[in-house]
Image: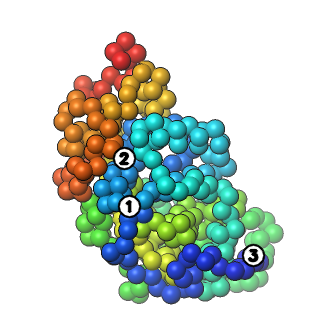
Amino acid sequence: MCDSVNTGALPQNAAEFSGVSGATQTNQPVVGRFAPTPSGRMHLGNVFSALMAWLSARSAGGRMIMRVEDLDPRAQDRAVAGLLMDDLAWLGLDWDEGPYFQSERGDLYAKAIAQLCEQGLTYPCFCTRSELHAATAPHASDGTYVYQGTCRNLSPKEIAEKSRLRAPATRLRVPNEDDPTGTVSFCDIVYGPCSEVLARECGDFLVRRSDGVVAYQLAVVVDDALIGVTQVVRGHDLLGSVPRQMYLQRKLGFSSPSYAHVPLLVGPDGRRLSKRDHDLDLGVIRENGYSPRKVIGYLASLVGLAEKGEEVSADELVPRFSWDALRKHRADIVMEHETLPPFADASRP
Ligand SMILES: [Zn+2]
C-alpha cells in the first residue's frame, strides 16, 4: 500500500535518489556527526562515543555535523537538546554545521518511504506488539525480534478490512533467505568484517510505526546521505543496525558511509551505562566543578590515548588519535567502582 505523499522535487544534494545501488565511498574528506537524543543529559558513555567521533574527524582534517535525533515525541524538548549541545561545546567538541533536528525533516523521510513504496518494497503491517512477540523468536544478539512475514501477502480486501480497525505500520520487504541480494556485508573500522542475512537476522523491518513516527533506521539513512555524512562513529550497541541501514541506502540510491563502532561503557554488573546512572551524567559532573580536561583525560585513558589521571583537552588529543587504540579495546569497558573517578563526590572536586 503506497502513501499518497507528494514525492515532488528531490533534494539536490543527494547523489541519487532513484533506487540505484550505492557503493561505499572512499578517498573523500571525513564528515562525521554527533547524533544525540534529547531524552536526558548525556552520560559518560555518550560522551566517550562523541569524543571518538570528533577525534576521528578532526585527526583526518574533516568536519563535524550536529544532528539532534528527536523523532520520538517524548524526546523533543528543545531545552534538553540545548543542554546536550552546551555539554559538547563545554568539552571542546565543536561542529561545523547544524544543528539539524529530525523532528523538522518529516517531508524528507516521507519522500524516501514513497520511493520505497513505488518500488513495491513496502507493505502495511497490522500486527500488535503482543502478536509480534507471540509469533516471533527473539534475535540472538540484541533482543530484537525477527518478523515472520505475517502481513507480507495480505490481499487488498484484507488490507481494507484491517485498516478499518487499526492504523498500520509500514514494513520494508527484504529478499528471501536464499536470495544473495539479501546478504549485507561490510567492514567496520574497529570490529572488522561483518555480514548478515537480513531475512534470517531481522526479517522485513519497520520504516514507519503505526503511530506515524518514522523508524530510526530510515531517518538515520536519509539524514546521513542528504547531510553528506561519510563516517558514522557510534556505540557498539548499534553495530547490528548497519545491515538494515546499508540495505536502505542501496534501495534509495545512496552511497554508504564508513562505519566505526566503539566499545560501550558498562557498570560492574555488565549493564551499559544509561540515563539511570545519574551520578555519571554531565549535569552532575559539571555541577561538581570538574573541568573538561579532567573528563576528556579520563575517557581517553580508558583506551590508552591518555595516561591514567592525565588531564588533557580534546584538541591536544587530536594528534594522538588512532583507530588502532580502539581496535585494542573492542570489549565493553567495565567501570569498576574502585576505578570510577569521584565525579559525583562533591567533597573531592
Ligand atoms: Zn504484521
Residue under the point 33% across and 51% down: 55
Q: Earlier in the sequence, mark 3 or mark 2?
A: 3
Q: Is residue 211 left or right of residue 239?
A: right
Q: Nearer the viewer, residue 102 or 153?
A: 102
Q: Which dot marks residue 79? A: none
Which residue corresponds to mark 2? Answer: 51
Secondary structure under the numbered disc 3 in the rendered image: loop
Report, in whole angstroms, how far the alpha carbon at label 3 lies from the one at label 2: 39 Å
Report, in whole angstroms, how far the alpha carbon at label 2 lies from the one at label 1: 14 Å
Secondary structure under the numbered disc 1 in the rendered image: loop
Q: Position of residue 287 (x, y in %)?
A: 47, 22
Classify the position of the N terminus by image quarter. bottom right
Q: Which amino acid type is shown beneath numbered disc 1?
A: Gly
| In the depicted structure, whether residue 249 falls above or below residue 238 | below
Q: Earlier in the sequence, mark 3 or mark 1?
A: 3
Residue under the point 67% across and 49% down: 73
| In the depicted structure, whether residue 323 falls above or below residue 291 | below
Q: Which dot marks residue 62? A: 1
